[in-house]
Image (cartoon, rainbow, N blue to C red):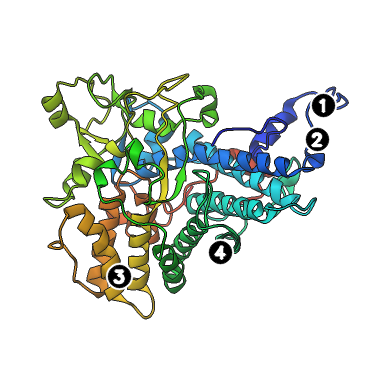
Amino acid sequence: MKKYITYFQILGLAALLLFTSCGEDFIDVAPNNENSEDYFNTPEDYELALVGAYDLLQATYLNVLVGEIASDNTLAGGESATDTPGIQEIDNMTHTPVNQQLRDIWGWMFSGVNRANYILEFQDKIDFDGKNEIIAQARFLRAYYYFELVKWFGDVPLAVDQRLLFGDQFNVDRTPASEVYAQIELDLIFAAENLPATQAQEGRVTSGAARALLGKAYLYQDKFTEAANALDQVIAGPYDLLDDYSILFLQEGENSVESVFEVQYTDKEGAGFGCLQCSEGNVAVGFNGIRNYSGPEFDSGFSFNVPVAEAYNAFEPGDSRQDNAILDIEAFAARTGATYNEGYEHTGYFNRKYLPRKGDANLGDANLTNPNNYRSIRFADVLLMAAEAHNRKTNPNDVLAQEYLNRVRRRAFGDLDHDIVATGAALTEFIYAERRLELVGEGHRFFDLVRTGRAADEIPGFTPNKNELFPIPSIEIELAGNRWEQNQGY
């Protein structure tokens, strides 16, 4: 979604505080731009502000990239052991509160919260047809950004229908994660009840997307019955699996019947390393790309986020997802004559789902403006979340859990011979394994391992009672007057 906000820019709390270093002689200068307190006077104002709230979704490329690297699916890669140190530290589970990537995730997600809250702060200023749907979209977006914050950092400051502004840092405290989740649930229930099932404009949130994220939020809290109920409503339609997995992450697979919620990117507006969140392209794609690549199908990139052999070999024989999800570059080069350089921690594999594609415009920096959309919530994920919820709820429905799981497997293998018939705890393990295979490279694995208590057994270097959460950036604690406690272990 393009940026159309020209009269204002709403920043995260820490970013706002950066302006305190300026002198005081600027305060009497008449502003050129419209005052934010007097902004919402027409329906178009609300619509433009909503576009601004959507815009921070594009910055979640970093959440996906770093979230995958934090798991056992991939290694950091890059050019060397010192290439983007924050990413290398997260890969090694040696990250500290002084980590640029974690600070970016914190700041960008709170910027998204603030932009959504800006609309909601003034939701009653005027009335017009269609306003309720704008409010519902804003509440979904606030829930989306807060869900990212709570799963990364746990307890975070909760602001409802008001912005976090300069000075608030002295009286805003971290809110317990349970209360943040409660607000996420309220926002998503409202969104689900006030949004249409389909939207004319691609990328706009729907009632199905709201219910899917609601089901996911329930799942992360082990509210399995509630999760099953929400996700069953999504499964009822209008979504379905694409017949051909091989096109799912190509351009023709974007905004397909399998897409429940998809972050939109474009190759028409570039950015630079000084403002990665300003890019309208998917920055993660360039980072995932093959280093100094020359050959068919793909463009070159920075060789970060390289899958490990264990992830590639986890697929069963005959699983069509294996080579469509993970690129075996040596086999591909032998077949096509492509050439490339090996980067740091080269494994021989690349995340094929999100590689730079030939033929894209990539205006500006080619590595920062790839147009590959991110499938934030897709129908296969919904099926597997619902399978888990039905299997793990107080009164399990393993027959329905098997049905959902096997819908995903039947597409993968093209037959019914690989159906799972297990029940109980054995079925739970099959569902966990299937989530890894189906969703590899999409940024879910680390959080799946954490929420199910398996991270310490699967992720090298993971320290229990510490690495379940990431540290609050130290600058944020300092700006709050050192009143906040750091997350355990940091």
Q: Is residue 125 left or right of residue 158?
A: right
Q: Nearer the viewer, residue 80 or 29?
A: 29
What percent of the width, then of the height, locates residue 364?
A: 47, 19
Q: Which residue is mark 3?
A: 401
Q: Which mark is residue 35?
A: 2
The type of residue carrying mark 4 is Ser
Q: Earlier in the sequence, mark 1 or mark 4?
A: 1
Q: Is residue 145 above or below residue 330?
A: below
Give the distance between the C-alpha atoms of the residues marked 1 and 4, in whole angstroms. Answer: 41 Å
Q: Earlier in the sequence, mark 2 or mark 3?
A: 2
Q: Which residue is mark 1?
A: 31
The type of residue carrying mark 1 is Pro
Q: Which residue is mark 4?
A: 178
What percent of the width, then of the height, locates residue 357?
A: 32, 28
Q: Earlier in the sequence, mark 4 or mark 3?
A: 4
SS label for mark 2: loop
Q: Is residue 198 above or below residue 401?
A: above
What percent of the width, then of the height, locates residue 270?
A: 50, 23
Which residue does the image show at 40% across and 66% down from the upper left? 236
Badge 1 crowding class, 10 Å Cα cut-off, few under 14, some 14 to 19, many 20 or more, is: few
Give the distance between the C-alpha atoms of the residues marked 2 and 4, in whole angstroms. Answer: 35 Å
Badge 2 crowding class, 10 Å Cα cut-off, few under 14, some 14 to 19, many 20 or more, is: few
Q: Nearer the viewer, mark 1 or mark 4?
A: 1
Q: Total marks drawn?
A: 4
